[in-house]
Image (spheres, rainbow, N blue to C red):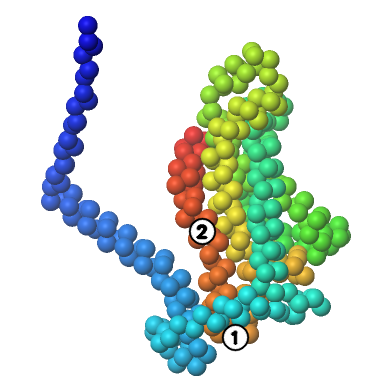
Amino acid sequence: MQENQTTPVKTKRRKVKMDTSQKVTFIIYGVIFVVFAVLCLYPLFWVLCNSLKGYEELKTSSLALPNSFDLSIYGEILSFTDSSFTAVRVGFWGMAFNSIWMAFGGQAINLLASVCVAYPLARYKFPFKKFFYAIIIFRITIPVVGAGPASYKFMRTLNFLDNPGPFMLTYFTGFDMMALILYGYFKGISKDYSEAAYIDGASRLRTFFTIILPQAMPCILALYINQVMGAWNNFSTTQIYLHSYPNLAYGIYNRLNKKMDPQFFAAVFMSSLVPLALFGAFQKTMMTNMSVGGLKG
């Protein structure tokens, strides 16, 4: 006997017709989206156009399109050196390297500290648990006015100024917004997975690394990329604490007080490529997991 083979029936999707009010709403939202997109992209486009102009053309027409595309200015940026920071001349690649270890390395340490704080608060019961949670809320909601001079004196006393190794320890804080988001994400993970691992003989540490951490990795990655994008453009930390190790943000800011020339605009455009690339590659991960983590909290 031959078995009857059933072929899948293809169903056509019906087009939902919008009424007049829905069409008007759709058009209004579309216009708002286009205007918002233009306002966000125009500054970057303006910087790119001015970086391709000559010195004289930039002085006469900074808002117009470039008459000719002069790409040699980017070669000047790559070979640019500035001795105004230290006795050692710092070039573009040196500033880029400083930006990488400050942004990627510093935020990795900060994220590790946030995980160490958020996971026990979300999954275990221990004395003063609510007190530690209150510290996170207090640190986020209430600004510490006038802490800058005290922080600078504290860093100078510990010899952390212009000392990258010990200064990286200051990123190991944990009581911040990332800890609050991770707290909600860890709390939303079902405890059935942990209990099943405990029954099979897994330790608490192994349960965390093999069961909980892989489930929370999308949220952790989204938080990490978001923090790196913000830290990439941070020049105040370098200006105050690590003056001998300028990053790209502070190197560009240092030239802002001198003159705005094609070199300046080219450096700004090249520095913005890293945050744009990170957002373009991980935008889906950031939008999905950041919102889900917040809702679970």
Find residue 155 and report its horizontal and vertical position in percent. Answer: 81, 59
Q: Is tag 1's residue or tag 2's residue first in the polypeptide sequence? A: 1
Judged from the image, the secondary structure of the residue bearing numbered disc 2 is helix
In the rendered image, the vertical position of residue 114 relative to residue 4, given as above or below: below
The residue at the far front in this view is 1
Mark 2: few/some/many CA within 10 Å (<14, 14-19, 20+):
few
Looking at the image, do the residues carrying marks 1 and 2 touch, with CB atoms under 8 Å apart? no
Labels in figure, total: 2
Residue under label 1: 259
Q: Which mark is drawn over residue 277?
A: 2
In the rendered image, the vertical position of residue 197 relative to residue 150, given as above or below: above
Does residue 291 show up?
no
Q: Is residue 99 shown left or right of residue 11?
A: right
CA–CA distance in space, label 1 to label 2: 28 Å
User: Picture quarter containing residue 260?
Assistant: bottom right
Q: Residue at x 66, y 51 (%)?
A: 107
Quadrant placement of the N terminus: top left
Name the amino acid, label 2: Ala
User: Picture quarter containing residue 77?
Assistant: bottom right
Q: Is residue 1 shown left or right of residue 71?
A: left
Q: Residue at x 53, y 40 (%)?
A: 218
Find residue 191 and report its horizontal and vertical position in percent. Answer: 56, 22
Q: Residue at x 15, y 46 (%)?
A: 18
Judged from the image, the secondary structure of the residue bearing numbered disc 1 is loop
Viewer-closest of 7 and 152 = 7
Find residue 288 and report its horizontal and vertical position in percent. Answer: 45, 43
Q: Which mark is drawn over residue 153?
A: none
In the rendered image, the vertical position of residue 47 relative to residue 229, given as above or below: below
Name the amino acid, label 1: Lys
